[in-house]
Image: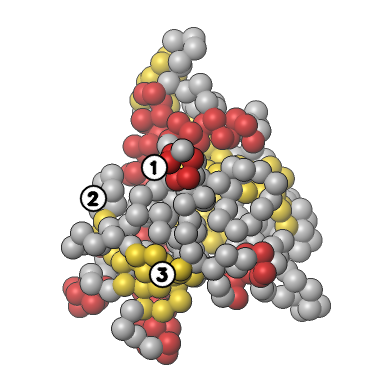
Amino acid sequence: MTISLDRETAAPTTITVSKLGSRIGARIDGVRLGGDLAPETVADIRAAINEHKVVFFRGQDHLDDDGQIAFGELLGPLTTAHPTVNTGSARVLALKATQGMAANSWHTDVTFVDRVPAFSVLRGVTIPAYGGSTVWANTVTAYETLPPQLKALVDDLWAVHTNDYDYANHYTEEGEANTQFSRAEFASTVYQTEHPVVRVHPETGERSLLLGHFVKNFVGFNSKESSTLFNLLQDRVTKLENTVRWTWEQGDVAIWDNRATQHYATADFDTQLREVRRITVQGPVPVSIDGRESRVLQGSADVYNRLDELIR
């Protein structure tokens, strides 16, 4: 528990951080999220994210898109909504589904670009009466618990990540597209980036596995070998003891460290409406254990990371 001062009223604010699992997850109470939080409060939230990898806030119904953006900017400069998908907002990615569709595949957000986002801030707008929970996995403890033989393999392993694959083209039994984004839109600009499988966290110094469903192949391995190795490592990441599951309520906000987690949105809410809105905070280019940076193979994400605005 920490106490900080509200920026406008200077009234003491009590923040309670309650651990949800031994490896990942915490709930934070006593905070009304917005752009007017005191620096001490923001620092407390950031420290909790670094420690627990994903944190949750109940009762944030007062937030709208502007409030979510204003709060997110306290954590750092924001990206645009998405490198390819246009949902009508320069900063907010609206994810709406009525066919049970969700991002029901383990992934780290937008790893197909070179500057993988640092944090994702997700707000529950319309929550179904049942289903639609989200699960997160800790990619730091996944690495730390690897046997020495596997660590020796992955410490110098690199993988190609891309958005040009079948993720955006799932179908229902009726044959209708079961996603709000078309494959053509999702891959309208093709990105391929070579990332280290083990990256060093820029704030904590921890080592984490950089994998997820955007991985196309491992450098030096053929498709069959890559698939076998990928499944072996992903099983380590998604072991149940390494995860936390959040059942959404209206007005909830989840913030996760995109440099140290994967997540999976469960598609079990039938035809109910589920809408969540996401903003992402810019991150640096991942760095390997030996200090090498990720390498762009195809596509420039400067616009996504608003680097063009910084140049002007």
Mark 1, residue position: 49
Q: Which mark is residue 205?
A: 2
Please tell me which residue is depicted at 73% across the width and 57% down the height of the picture: 97
Question: What distance separates the C-alpha of mark 3 from that of mark 1?
Answer: 31 Å
At mark 3, the secondary structure is strand
Label 2 neighbourhood size at 10 Å, few (<14), some (14-19), many (20+)?
few
Question: What distance separates the C-alpha of mark 3 from that of mark 2?
Answer: 26 Å
Label 1 neighbourhood size at 10 Å, few (<14), some (14-19), many (20+)?
many
Q: As shown in the figure, which amino acid type bears the numbered disc 2?
A: Gly
Q: Is residue 16 left or right of residue 86?
A: left
Question: What distance separates the C-alpha of mark 2 from that of mark 1?
Answer: 14 Å
What is the x, y in percent for residue 151?
22, 72
Q: As shown in the figure, which amino acid type bears the numbered disc 1?
A: Ile
Mark 3, residue position: 297
Extreme residue in the right direction: 174
Of tags 3 and 1, the one toward the viewer is: 3
At mark 1, the secondary structure is helix
Residue 53 vs 106, above or below: the answer is: above
